[in-house]
C-alpha cells in the first residue's frame, strides 16, 4: 500500500498518510507507531498528519477502514468458479501482505473482542459466505456443511502461507512469494476442491 512517490502521484495527502500508516502499523504494531514516523514515511509534515487524524488510535481505525474498503472493490465481478477465485485471492495476498499483517496486529494488540469497524467488515465477509452458498447450490461444494464454517476453512487454507511465511519456508522449502510455490499450492488446492465437489 505504501508505495513510491511515483505510485502515489495523484493521491490526496490524507490517502498518502493512510498508505504510510498501514505500512507502519503492519511493521511496528499499533503501540510501536509514532505519528512523526508516519509523517516521515509519507513525506509530509507531522502537523498535516494530526490535521487529518487526531490521534494514533484514530489513525489505526482509519487504516483498517481503508484496507477493507480496498478489499470491497474486489468483490464485484469475481469468477463463478472456485479455482480461478482462489488464484485471484492468492495473487492478492502474495502481492499485498500488509492486509493480513494489519488485521493480525489488531487481533494481537487490542484488548477488545469487538473488531474495529465490525459492521463494515461483517458485510464484507457475509458477501463471501453468500458466495460459498452459491457454490453449494451449484454442487461445487458439499451441501452438508454450513457455509460459514466452510468459508473459514477455505480461507484458513488460503491465507496460512502468507500469514506465516517462515513456517511455509520451513515446511515447503520455498517462500510463498516464489512462482514455484504458487504453482504447487494452486495445484494442490484444486485437488482439494475437486475432492469436495458433490459427486
Image (tube, helix red, strand yellow):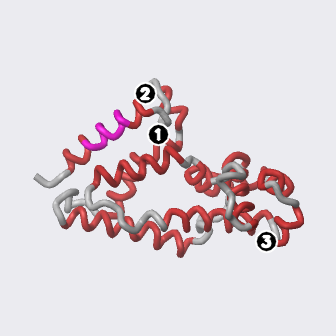
User: On screen, 146 above or below 191?
Assistant: below
Q: CA distance from mark 2 to mark 3?
A: 44 Å
Residue wearing tag 1: 161
Q: How far from the left and from the top, in percent, is residue 169? A: 50, 28
Tell me which label, 3 or 1, sits earlier in the chain: 3
- Judge from the rendering whether residue 182 lies leftward or rightward of residue 111; answer left or right: left
Magenta run includes residue 185:
yes
Q: Pointer 3: residues within 10 angstroms few (<14), some, or many (20+)?
A: some
Q: Pointer 2: residues within 10 angstroms few (<14), some, or many (20+)?
A: some
* Residue at 42% in and 66% down: 75
Image disc number at residue 172: 2
Secondary structure found at label 1: helix
Secondary structure found at label 2: helix
Secondary structure found at label 3: helix
* Residue at 46% in and 43% down: 160
Q: How far from the left and from the top, in percent, is residue 61? A: 68, 67
Image disc number at residue 52: 3
Range shown magenta: 183-190
Q: Main secondary structure of the magenta part?
A: helix
* Residue at 46% in and 73% down: 123
Tell me which label, 2 or 3, sits earlier in the chain: 3
Amino acid at each position: 500500500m505504501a508505495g513510491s512517490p511515483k505510485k502515489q502521484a495523484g493521491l490526496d495527502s490524507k490517502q498518502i498518510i493512510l498508505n504510510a500508516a498501514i505500512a507502519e502499523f503492519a511493521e511496528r504494531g499499533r503501540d510501536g507507531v509514532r505519528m512523526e514516523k508516519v509523517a516521515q514515511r509519507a513525506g509530509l509534515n507531522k502537523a498535516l498528519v494530526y490535521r487529518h487524524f487526531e490521534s494514533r488510535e484514530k489513525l489505526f481505525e482509519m487504516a483498517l477502514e481503508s484496507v477493507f474498503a480496498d478489499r470491497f472493490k474486489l468483490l464485484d465481478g469475481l469468477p463463478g468458479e472456485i479455482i480461478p477465485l482462489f488464484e485471484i485471492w492468492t495473487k492478492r495476498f502474495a502481492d499485498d501482505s500488509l492486509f493480513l499483517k494489519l488485521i493480525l496486529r489488531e487481533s494481537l494488540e487490542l484488548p477488545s473482542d469487538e473488531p474495529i469497524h465490525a459492521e463494515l467488515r461483517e458485510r464484507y465477509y457475509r458477501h463471501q459466505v453468500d458466495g460459498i452458498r452459491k457454490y453449494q447450490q451449484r454442487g461445487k461444494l458439499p451441501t452438508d456443511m454450513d457455509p460459514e464454517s466452510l468459508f473459514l476453512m477455505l480461507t484458513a487454507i488460503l491465507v496460512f502461507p502468507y500469514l506465516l511465511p517462515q513456517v511455509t519456508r520451513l515446511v515447503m522449502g520455498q517462500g510463498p512469494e516464489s512462482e514455484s510455490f504458487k504453482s504447487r499450492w494452486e495445484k494442490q488446492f484444486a485437488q482439494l476442491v475437486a475432492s469436495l465437489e458433490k459427486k
